[in-house]
Image (cartoon, grey):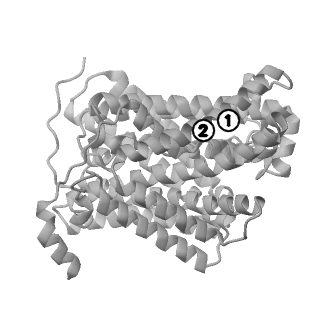
């Protein structure tokens, strides 16, 4: 009753809009920070080398980037015709209808919640390790995770530009040390890998597992669209930020993973990754840049994870906000702060949800890396691939129906190629899912069932609440030349 009273007294007085002057650079910072570049180099690259296609793993990033660029062509073309800041679900709604749209919305909530929980679990373990390395006390990982959730919650509650500045500083620091590492490896000129030049090596080992790990590393690039309301010029800023983020992430991952292989040599890199994947990158940086470089890399790994957690928090808060505005969630989630013009209720809701799950994981005695991180990251990988495949279908359906854009490449050829590539990645991920989460087939089935259930619940909810997501479809603009 108190909650309802709060809404009846204040809900009509609050603005339901977010404001900001985010340019391409600020949005790219937040999206690239969500990708956690240093975390990918430290966590994904060793796994891809050891379990994937060996020294050719760097080329897998380039292949996945190409598929996602094809997806982005249709995604960006449709962004002109989707004024809502709901990203995937808004596109699915416009292209495939209200029920699939709300199903996609619920699936997106579960997907991004999972990836944020994965980051918090890993972050708790990394901070605990650093504190003990510096002579501090051994404290539970979940305590550090809850502290991080609180700090992220405070930043998420305030105006988006504050988060953008914080993410910018952290991102510059983590990228800088990796670029220095890359430059030193190239300057030495020893063991420079040529595996990426030999197509037979691309498909050696397990290409499916390699693609699975690589595609997971790009999670977050598509979140550019959720910042639409806070962008300086949405119709220009969102497409430019999407392409810029994808290209930066793809080039960074490809070059830096190649540098890691080159620092060891092809065979030695695979051997080192298999022997100690958890510490391979810190060992590699220490070997190349010295002990001080290794210590700095450890600290920046922690800040990389924090930046990713903050970025995904902002994405989730804006999903809650968009769904609150349409009535899919409580209307309070769709209100913005009178001073900060931030989705403060949505942000606070996401903070409470994340803290509650961390407490549940702690009570269950789950390992922060082997279970929380692995299981949640696997869930997010499967979920985001399903969402992108649905969005590709929505793009095709929307332009065939509306004829709002008649450019064949943008509305047909690229979206079809992108969807075929994503379907291939989805099939490979499903078939290798038990490997990705490090669990049993039963666990993989249970996680997949949760994602399917989230989508079905959204569809059922849309049928029970006909007014949900009933905003009128925007009038298409004139066809593009």
Q: Tell me the residue at 35%/57% (across/down).
A: 157
Q: Image check: 64 left or right of 349?
A: right
| Residue 246, x across and y down, in percent | 50, 33
Which image quadrant: the N terminus?
Answer: bottom left
Q: Tell me the residue at 67%/69% (across/down).
A: 367
> What numbered label is drawn on residue 363?
none
Q: Tell me the residue at 37%/22% (across/down).
A: 409
Q: Dot 2: few (<14), some (14–19), or many (≥20) neighbours within 10 Å?
A: some
Pointers 2 and 1 in contact (C-beta within 8 Å): yes
For the view shown, which residue lies furthest in the bottom direction?
1
Residue 90 shows in the view: yes
Whether residue 377 is situated above or below residue 160 in the rendered picture: below
Residue corresponding to mark 2 = 173
Q: Dot 1: few (<14), some (14–19), or many (≥20) neighbours within 10 Å?
A: some
Residue corresponding to mark 1 = 177
| Residue 25, x across and y down, in percent | 42, 31
Alpha carbon distance from label 2 to label 1? 7 Å
Whether residue 219 is situated above or below residue 197 in the rendered picture: below
Q: How many marks?
A: 2
| Nearer to the camera, 396 or 152 | 152
| Residue 348, x across and y down, in percent | 36, 64
Which image quadrant: the C terminus?
Answer: top left
Where residue 406 sits, quadrant-wise, is top left
Secondary element under disc 1, as helix, strand or loop, is helix
Q: Image check: 440 left or right of 226?
A: right
Where residue 121 sits, quadrant-wise, is bottom right
Q: Image check: 57 left or right of 428?
A: right
| Residue 203, x across and y down, in percent | 72, 35
Residue 424 shows in the view: no
């Amino acid at each position: 009753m108190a909650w309802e009273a709060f809404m009846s007294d204040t809900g009509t007085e609050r603005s339901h809009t977010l404001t900001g002057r985010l340019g391409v650079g600020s949005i790219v910072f937040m999206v690239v920070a969500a990708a956690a570049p240093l975390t990918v180099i430290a966590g994904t690259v060793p796994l891809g080398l050891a379990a994937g296609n060996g020294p050719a793993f760097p080329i897998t990033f380039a292949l996945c980037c190409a598929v996602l660029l094809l997806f982005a062509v249709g995604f960006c073309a449709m962004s002109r015709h989707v004024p809502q800041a709901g990203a995937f679900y808004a596109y699915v709604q416009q292209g495939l209808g209200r029920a699939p749209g709300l199903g996609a919305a619920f699936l997106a909530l579960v997907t991004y919640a999972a990836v944020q929980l994965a980051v918090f679990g890993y972050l708790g373990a990394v901070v605990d390790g650093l504190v003990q390395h510096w002579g501090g006390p051994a404290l539970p990982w979940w305590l550090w995770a809850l502290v991080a959730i609180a700090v992220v919650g405070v930043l998420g509650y305030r105006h988006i530009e504050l988060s953008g500045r914080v993410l910018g500083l952290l991102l510059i620091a983590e990228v800088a040390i990796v670029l220095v590492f890359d430059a030193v490896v190239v300057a030495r000129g020893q063991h420079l890998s040529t595996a990426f030049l030999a197509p037979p090596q691309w498909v050696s080992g397990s290409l499916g597992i390699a693609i699975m790990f690589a595609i997971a590393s790009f999670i977050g690039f598509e979140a550019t669209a959720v910042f639409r309301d806070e962008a300086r010029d949405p119709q220009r800023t969102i497409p430019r930020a999407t392409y810029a983020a994808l290209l930066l992430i793809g080039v960074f991952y490809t070059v830096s993973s190649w540098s890691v292989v080159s620092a060891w040599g092809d065979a030695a890199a695979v051997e080192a990754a298999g022997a100690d994947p958890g510490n391979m990158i810190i060992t590699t940086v220490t070997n190349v840049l010295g002990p001080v470089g290794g210590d700095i890399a450890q600290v920046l790994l922690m800040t990389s994870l924090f930046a990713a957690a903050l970025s995904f928090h902002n994405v989730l808060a804006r999903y809650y906000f968009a769904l609150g505005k349409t009535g899919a969630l409580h209307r309070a989630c769709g209100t913005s702060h009178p001073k900060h013009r931030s989705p403060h209720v949505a942000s606070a809701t996401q903070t409470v949800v994340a803290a509650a799950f961390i407490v549940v994981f702690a009570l269950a005695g789950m390992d922060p890396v082997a279970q929380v991180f692995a299981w949640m990251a696997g869930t997010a990988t499967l979920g985001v691939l399903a969402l992108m495949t649905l969005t590709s279908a929505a793009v095709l359906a929307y332009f065939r129906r509306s004829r709002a854009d008649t450019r064949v490449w943008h509305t047909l050829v690229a979206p079809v190629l992108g969807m075929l590539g994503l379907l291939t990645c989805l099939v490979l991920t499903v078939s290798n899912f038990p490997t990705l989460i490090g669990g049993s087939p039963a666990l993989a089935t249970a996680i997949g069932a949760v994602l399917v259930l989230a989508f079905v619940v959204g569809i059922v909810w849309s049928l029970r609440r006909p007014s949900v997501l009933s905003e009128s479809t925007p009038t298409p603009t004139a066809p593009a030349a």
